[in-house]
Image (spheres, rainbow, N blue to C red):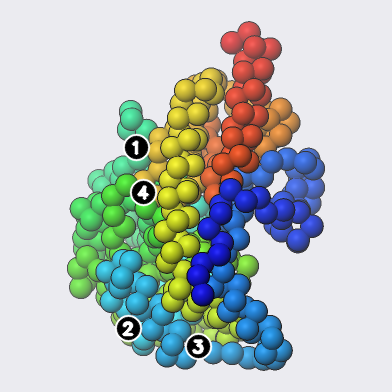
Amino acid sequence: MTEKNLNFDDPVNRYETDCLKYDFAKKRGKPEGLLSFWVADMDFRVSSYIQDALREVVEHGVFGYSESRVRYFNAVKNWMKTRHNFDVKEDALVKTPGVVYALAQAVKAFTKPEDAVLIQNPVYYPFADVVRDNGRKLVSSDLVQQSDGKYVVDFDDFDRKIVENNVKLFLLCSPHNPVGRVWTREELETLGDICVKRNVVVVADEIHHDFVFQGKHVVFETIKPEFAQRTVTCTSPSKSFNIAGLQTSNIFITNPKLRAQFKRAIDASGYSQLNTFGLAATRAAYENGAEWLDALIKYIDANLDFAVDYVNNEIPRAKTRKNEGTYLLWIDLRDSGWTDDEIESVVVNDAKLWLDGGPMFGAPGRGFQRMNLACSRSYLAQGLANLKRAIADRLSRNGQ
């Protein structure tokens, strides 16, 4: 068998498929008919190997309780070693229905009500949600944007926030969503040394680890043995292989004590076996999906180049920086001088686009919009052209 789904220019109609990205605009307070670039899934057919694996499950015709066996673990193990130089152990693996679920259970497992949990805004908004919704104190050591648009960590502020708030848990986003950083080994080592010194547990959300265009993704817990003893490493094939709806994530916890605490939190939530289809799809992805993913990465890299050039050279008062990782473009519209409500109006009502407004990623996201580039080039070009026209028209009407 050969990979059949390598034409990423081939449009896939996702309307009327109960698709969150396309079928729920009205329910989520948006007008109908918007071009959709928000939630982080892709508009591409999955690897044909995944489709074949799912057909096999369907043809069997029984969908009872399922569990993974050694072939599943070997597929995950080989992928992590080959792609990320991460030697995983079977007893360290805890499977969950998603990384956000794992983040929430980690907050419950490793902190108590009113304990402080640290994040780095602007960051993927469920980080803040799982902290607040579980009655913990949210603390942010905001990333610092340099003059070239690159975001860096203020390590002095990071350490100070931990000490001042007696932080117990740090949620690390690596690669970072939405700013697109792929943290260097040196940056991660400095963060880790501070967490070791201050006795902080680290939950490393590395779900975007396969999407790296500049630099190299370093698995946080592999940097030093003492990091592994205080880290929960969250991975999933969902972003890499566009199977988020199959709800399968692989969480690695080296420290037996932390692993036991984490498992107790999962047990308390009432969750047990994973989705039967998710297990089959994950195994197929990691066994046979490399060709598809490698082709996809090249396509998205070209989308990034196209979008960055277009934003910086064609869209007035807009600028961006090419991602080091992820397929989510972080667009800076602060030079427009508009409020976030005005930016949102231009994007939604004038450009007819559904993006993710920057403020949802924390206060440092004000004036920004996040755009999902995992779509066909023609669809992306249409969206960017709409944004160019809408911003230019609004500036003209305002006499700017």
Q: In this view, which residue lies farthest toward the top?
A: 399
Q: Which mark is residue 213?
A: 4
Q: Earlier in the sequence, mark 2 or mark 3?
A: 3
Circle 3 sits on which residue? 68
Kind of residue at badge 4: Phe
From the viewer's side, name the closer residue of 72 and 117. Answer: 72
Judge the density around disc 2: few (<14), some (14-19), many (≥20) Cα neighbours within 10 Å: few
Q: Earlier in the sequence, mark 3 or mark 4?
A: 3
| Residue 250 against residue 257 in the figure, above or below | above
Q: Is residue 400 left or right of residue 230?
A: right
Task: Check whether the beta carbons of the residues at disc 1 and disc 4 lie within 8 A of each other.
Answer: no
Q: Is residue 22 left or right of residue 75?
A: right
Circle 1 sits on which residue? 150
Q: CA distance from mark 1 to mark 4?
A: 15 Å
Task: Check whether the beta carbons of the residues at disc 2 and disc 3 lie within 8 A of each other.
Answer: no
Q: Earlier in the sequence, mark 1 or mark 4?
A: 1
| Residue 331: percent from left, percent from top | 50, 34
Kind of residue at badge 3: Ser
The kind of secondary structure element at disc 3 is loop
Q: Earlier in the sequence, mark 2 or mark 1?
A: 2
Q: Earlier in the sequence, mark 2 or mark 4?
A: 2
Q: Earlier in the sequence, mark 1 or mark 3?
A: 3
Kind of residue at badge 2: Lys
Q: CA distance from mark 2 to mark 4?
A: 28 Å
Q: In this view, which residue lies farthest toward the front?
A: 1
Circle 2 sits on which residue? 89
Can you see residue 130?
A: no
Q: Nearer the viewer, mark 1 or mark 3?
A: 3
Q: CA distance from mark 3 to mark 4?
A: 32 Å
Kind of residue at badge 1: Lys
| Residue 302: percent from left, percent from top | 45, 42
Q: Residue drawn at (76%, 61%), measured in percent from left and top?
A: 17
